[in-house]
Amino acid sequence: MSANAGEVFARLAQTFASRKGADPASSYVAKLFSKAPDAALKKVGEEATEFVMACKDAELESSAEDRERVVAEAADVWFHMLVAMSRYDLGGADVLAELARREGISGIEEKASRPKSA
């Protein structure tokens, strides 16, 4: 089954919006929103670490189980990133637009063109 990324991101954005005032006892997303913004950010870090470990643990010629674990952990990272981004009214479509903007540009050149942080 092939999923249209834009449609999936739009549905997730709608879900997140509907959960912002929901009862934290009835929704995991509402629970994340009810805590300080650090709750979602902490989950991004935890899930990113789990993704890294799944990749490290996967064998070079990975099995179906290894591949499934890597995909599951990547989905967890994306999900929690999207929850965190929704606090800023940003979503997956914004990331897709940025990736499209960068397409065909050297990563070295793109990074060098960014404004320097103070």
Image (cartoon, rainbow, N blue to C red):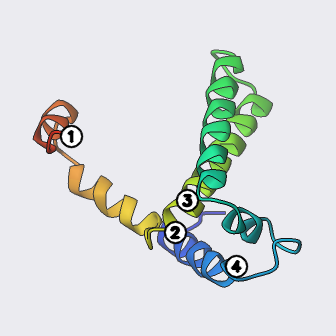
Q: Earlier in the sequence, mark 4 or mark 3?
A: 4
Task: Of the two numbered discs 1 and 3 on the same chain, state the one appearing first in sequence.
Answer: 3
Q: What amino acid is labelled 4 in the image?
A: Arg
Decide: marks 4, 2 in contact (CB < 8 A)? no
Mark 1 or 3, closer to the camera: 1
* Residue occupying image coordinates x 67% and y 67%: 33
Q: Is residue 4 left or right of residue 27?
A: left
Q: Are marks 3 and 2 in contact (CB under 8 Å)?
A: yes
List the residue tagged with mark 4.
19
To which residue does mark 3 refer? Answer: 84
Q: Secondary structure at mark 3?
A: helix
Q: Is residue 106 left or right of residue 97?
A: left
Under circle 1, the secondary element is loop
- Dot 4 and dot 3 residues touching (CB under 8 Å): no
Quadrant for residue 83, please give it: bottom right
Q: Identify which amino acid the numbered label 1 is placed on.
A: Ser
Amino acid at dot 2:
Ser
Q: Pointer 2: what residue?
A: 86
Marks 2 and 1, the one that precedes in the sequence: 2
Q: Residue 26 at x, y = what percent?
A: 87, 75
Which dot, 1 or 4, sits closer to the camera?
1
Check the picture and name the quadrant holding the N terminus. Answer: bottom right
Q: Is residue 62 above or below residue 74?
A: above
Contact flag, marks 2 and 1 (Cβ < 8 Å): no
Task: Give the SS element for disc 4.
Answer: helix
Disc 4 to disc 3, how far (Cα)? Answer: 13 Å
Q: Which residue is mark 1?
A: 117
